Amino acid sequence: MPESSSQDAGPGGHTVVVMTRSGCPTCERAEQDVERICGELGVRWSTADVDTDPEWRAEYGDRVPVILVDGDEHGYWSVDEQRLRAALEA
């Protein structure tokens, strides 16, 4: 699923995927937030374009960006920094 990765998984072994699409300013902001947060915590993260897979488009297309933590939906439309940090530090 991941297209690009920035770092190895952190101490908790967590991974974050930002489900995104081309030309989505909100997605770009979410990617910047996730990159910063995951960088600070040493957590591996990546992006996946929902428009490259019909199942992803059907599941996530109307809510991008969608943040997945360890494969589970964590949030959408924006990054809740406090909540994401709590999940990654657990």
Image (cartoon, helix red, strand yellow):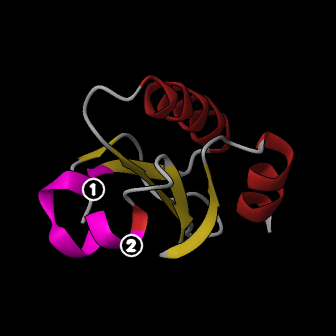
Q: CA distance from mark 2 to mark 1?
A: 9 Å
Q: Quadrant of residue 88?
A: bottom right
**Residue occupied by mark 2:** 59
- Image quadrant where one finds the N terminus: bottom left
Q: Position of residue 52 (x, y in %)?
A: 13, 56
Residue that badge 1 annotates? 50
Q: Quadrant of residue 11?
A: bottom right
Instruction: Give the residue drawn at x 24%, y 76%.
Output: 55
Q: Residue at x 44, y 56 (%)?
A: 62
State the image coordinates of residue 58 (x, y, percent, origin top left).
Answer: 31, 71
| Amino acid carrying mark 2 in the image | Glu
Instruction: Tell me what residue is drawn at x 78 percent, y 50 percent.
Output: 85
In this view, the residue in front, 29 or 4, is 29
Q: Secondary structure at mark 2?
A: helix
Quadrant position of the C terminus in the picture: bottom right
Residue 39 percent location from the top left of the image: 57, 35
Q: Is residue 46 above or below residue 28?
A: below
Q: Residues within 10 Å of mark 2 (few under 14, many from 20)?
A: few
Q: Nearer the viewer, residue 34 or 62?
A: 62
Q: Nearer the viewer, residue 12 or 24?
A: 24
Q: Residues within 10 Å of mark 1 (few under 14, many from 20)?
A: many
Q: Identify the element where label 1 is drawn.
A: helix
Q: Image point 30% across, 41% down: which residue?
A: 21
Magenta range: 48-59
Q: Is residue 1 magenta?
A: no
What percent of the width, then of the height, locates residue 35?
Answer: 52, 33
Give the main secondary structure, helix, strand or loop, of the magenta stretch.
helix
Left or right position of 45 against 57:
right
Q: Are marks 2 and 1 in contact (CB under 8 Å)?
A: yes
Label placed on residue 64: none
Examine the rendered structure and indicate whether residue 67 appears above or below residue 24.
below
- Residue 22 position (above or below residue 2): above
